[in-house]
Image (spheres, helix red, strand yellow):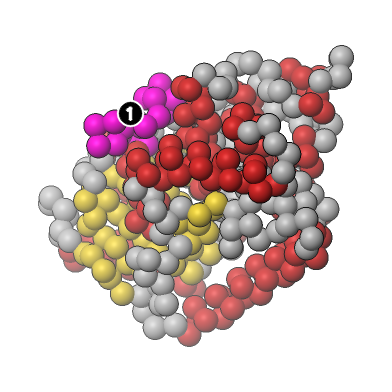
């Protein structure tokens, strides 16, 4: 699905994609209701936790009536798979949509650029639309964008859903140039003063990285420059062969919502974060950057740098008060979870589709799963 929109297809492609996504969700839901039970690829005892105990905790996560459709579940302990299970028609080679897990991947790429000296955490972000004298947007920093405190006007979700800024940016009037749509928003709050969860902030990060890589305005040049960077600095060193970002018509990576990977590659990315940016003896992204990503931000203790933290705070999709306080996660809108618990040496990947009510049950079952392991 890379490059799904281009300058010739325009709004029609955007609208068609929105319809296709809705129809796809309905097909998956209807199919899942009649699908046979999911099967295990791996189910191994782990220390004093036997296979029967593991299965008893994992099976409820495939209860479609309660938690929705779980497409895949993978648990690594000490870097080794102890549970790997897929829904019907899905397997280890199936690429699955990230939703907002992509934000955390984008943040790691930003961290690599900071280490390269291309970007600085507390410097104003160079956006041409914000350069007029007196424009308050000119004070927005990289830290603000990463911690969702840009101050830009944004409604992540609203009723009706098609009126939300996120849907407009991804699928309708903003889809041709998603970053420009985000960057054109006026200031609603002083930068750094308030947490507002915003996929638009992440799209600005994607555009910023692309402009650091190429001066060209040609969509193909922008797309190729970013794709080469992602491949050379993340995919190849971490062996993420399946990682497939999507790009908008201007050639900007849709880093806040639309990446695809196999479940095993999501887990590899989680292991990178568990090891504070180190893989195969090489520091792919600095440990200090991972510390920044997983440190509570001033305006929301439950959020770091494009990462959710297991602490009390605003809008938290995790389970504060249950499991280790050091646990953190990348979380997608429909119940995609990449959970990292360093103190327990755990990485848990759950990819699926759950509605709002089902996500409440899903969080409880994920919390129980975490609590089963020592240190939980």
Q: Position of residue 12 (x, y in %)?
A: 80, 65
Instruction: Say if residue 319 shows up in the picture.
Output: no
Q: Position of residue 336 (x, y in %)?
A: 49, 55
Image side of residue 17 versus residue 364, left or right: right
Taking the spot 62% from the left edge, 46% from the top edge, the residue there is: 223
Image quarter where the C terminus lies is top left
The residue tagged 1 is 283
Q: From the viewer's perspective, is residue 303 above or below residue 178? A: above
Circle 1 packing at 10 Å, graded few (<14), some (14-19), many (20+), is some
Name the element at disc 1: strand
State the image quarter where residue 44 is shown: bottom left
Taking the spot 65% from the left edge, 42% from the top edge, the residue there is: 222
| Front residue of 244 and 99 | 244
Q: Position of residue 14 (x, y in %)?
A: 75, 61
| Front residue of 272 and 84 | 272
Q: Residue furthest right?
A: 133
Taking the spot 52% from the left edge, 19% from the top edge, the residue there is: 117
State the image quarter where residue 62 is shown: bottom left
> What stretch of residues is rendered in magenta?
273-290
Image quarter where the N terminus lies is bottom right
Q: From the viewer's perspective, is residue 185 above or below residue 2? A: above
Q: Position of residue 24 (x, y in %)?
A: 61, 73
Does the segment drawn in magenta span residue 285?
A: yes
Does the segment drawn in magenta span residue 281?
A: yes
Taking the spot 70% from the left edge, 58% from the top edge, the residue there is: 5
Instruction: Say if residue 247 shows up in the picture.
Output: yes
Image side of residue 188 versus residue 307, left or right: right
Image side of residue 221 versus residue 104, left or right: right
């Amino acid at each position: 699905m890379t490059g799904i929109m281009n300058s010739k297809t325009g709004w029609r492609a955007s609208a068609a994609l929105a319809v296709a996504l809705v129809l796809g969700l309905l097909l998956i839901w209807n199919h899942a209701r009649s699908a046979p039970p999911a099967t295990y690829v791996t189910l191994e005892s782990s220390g004093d936790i036997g296979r029967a105990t593991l299965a008893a905790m994992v099976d409820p996560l495939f209860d479609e009536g309660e938690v929705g459709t779980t497409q895949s579940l993978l648990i690594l302990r000490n870097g080794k798979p102890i549970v790997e299970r897929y829904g019907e028609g899905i397997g280890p080679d199936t690429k699955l949509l990230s939703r907002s897990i992509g934000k955390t991947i984008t943040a790691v790429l930003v961290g690599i650029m900071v280490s390269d000296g291309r970007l600085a955490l507390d410097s104003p972000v160079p956006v041409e639309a914000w350069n007029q004298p007196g424009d308050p947007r000119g004070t927005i920093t990289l830290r603000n964008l990463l911690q969702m405190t840009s101050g830009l006007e944004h409604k992540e979700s609203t009723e009706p859903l098609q009126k939300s800024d996120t849907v407009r940016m991804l699928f309708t009037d903003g889809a041709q140039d998603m970053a420009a749509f985000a960057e054109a928003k006026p200031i609603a709050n002083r930068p750094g003063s308030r947490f507002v969860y915003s996929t638009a902030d992440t799209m600005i990060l994607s555009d910023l990285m692309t402009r650091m890589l190429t001066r060209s305005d040609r969509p193909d040049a922008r797309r190729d420059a970013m794709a080469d960077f992602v491949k050379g600095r993340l995919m190849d060193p971490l062996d993420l062969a399946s990682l497939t970002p999507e790009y908008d018509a201007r050639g900007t990576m849709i880093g806040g919502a639309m990446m695809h990977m196999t479940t095993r590659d999501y887990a590899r990315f989680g292991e990178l974060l568990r090891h504070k940016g180190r893989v195969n003896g090489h520091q792919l992204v600095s440990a200090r950057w991972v510390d920044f990503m997983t440190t509570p931000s001033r305006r929301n203790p439950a959020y770091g740098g494009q990462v959710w933290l297991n602490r009390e705070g605003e809008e938290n999709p995790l389970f504060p008060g249950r499991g280790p306080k050091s646990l953190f996660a990348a979380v997608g809108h429909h119940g995609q979870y990449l959970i990292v618990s360093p103190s327990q040496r755990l990485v848990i990947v759950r990819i699926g589709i759950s509605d709002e009510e089902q996500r409440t049950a899903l969080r409880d079952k994920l919390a129980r799963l975490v609590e089963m392991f020592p240190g939980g």
